[in-house]
Image (spheres, rainbow, N blue to C red):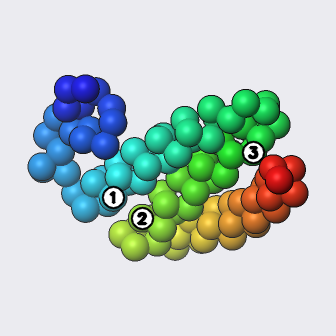
Amino acid sequence: MPAGMGGNDMVMPGMAMWQDHQKESMEGMKSMGMDMMQGMMKEDADVSFACGMIAHHMGAISKAEVELKHGDNDEMKAAAQKVIDDQTKEIEELTSWVEKEVK
């Protein structure tokens, strides 16, 4: 697949000039997208949903971690921490369900 068209070698125009937070956010989005696609390929619709959502929530955590690392606004940093706390709990709940369901 050509660069910039998906996959692990995804390159966006001007990426070399991006700020660190932009690069880190893009890396998190690439990982989330691939993980979501893998999760959604499960045959069982419920397991597919749960696995896709786990990956989605992991992407949200990754994005929130970038905000905590690079952000300056206290309100946005608090929102990022809330995302991490809430999404971590949801990942634990979904993971527990998947582990019981998939034997």
| Badge 3 amino acid | Ala
Please give left or right for residue 93 compared with residue 74 in the image. right
| Badge 2 amino acid | Val
Q: Position of residue 78 (x, y in %)?
A: 60, 71
Please give left or right for residue 15 compared with residue 87 in the image. left
The residue pinned by badge 1 equals: 24
Q: Position of residue 85 (x, y in %)?
A: 69, 70
Mark 2 and mark 1: span between their CA atoms? 7 Å
- Which mark, residue 50? 3
Q: Position of residue 67 (x, y in %)?
A: 45, 65
Foreground mark, 3 or 1?
Answer: 3
Mark 3 and mark 1: span between their CA atoms? 25 Å
Q: Quadrant of residue 48?
A: top right
Between 71 and 44, the one lying in front of the other is 44
Q: Earlier in the sequence, mark 2 or mark 1?
A: 1
Q: Quadrant of residue 79?
A: bottom right
| Relative height, residue 30 to residue 98 (above, below) | above
Please give left or right for residue 7 compared with residue 51 in the image. left
Mark 3 and mark 2: span between their CA atoms? 25 Å
- Which mark, residue 66? 2
SS type, badge 2: helix
Q: Quadrant for the N terminus, please.
A: top left
Residue at position x 53%, y 53% in the image:
59
Residues marked 2 and 1 touching at CB (< 8 Å): yes
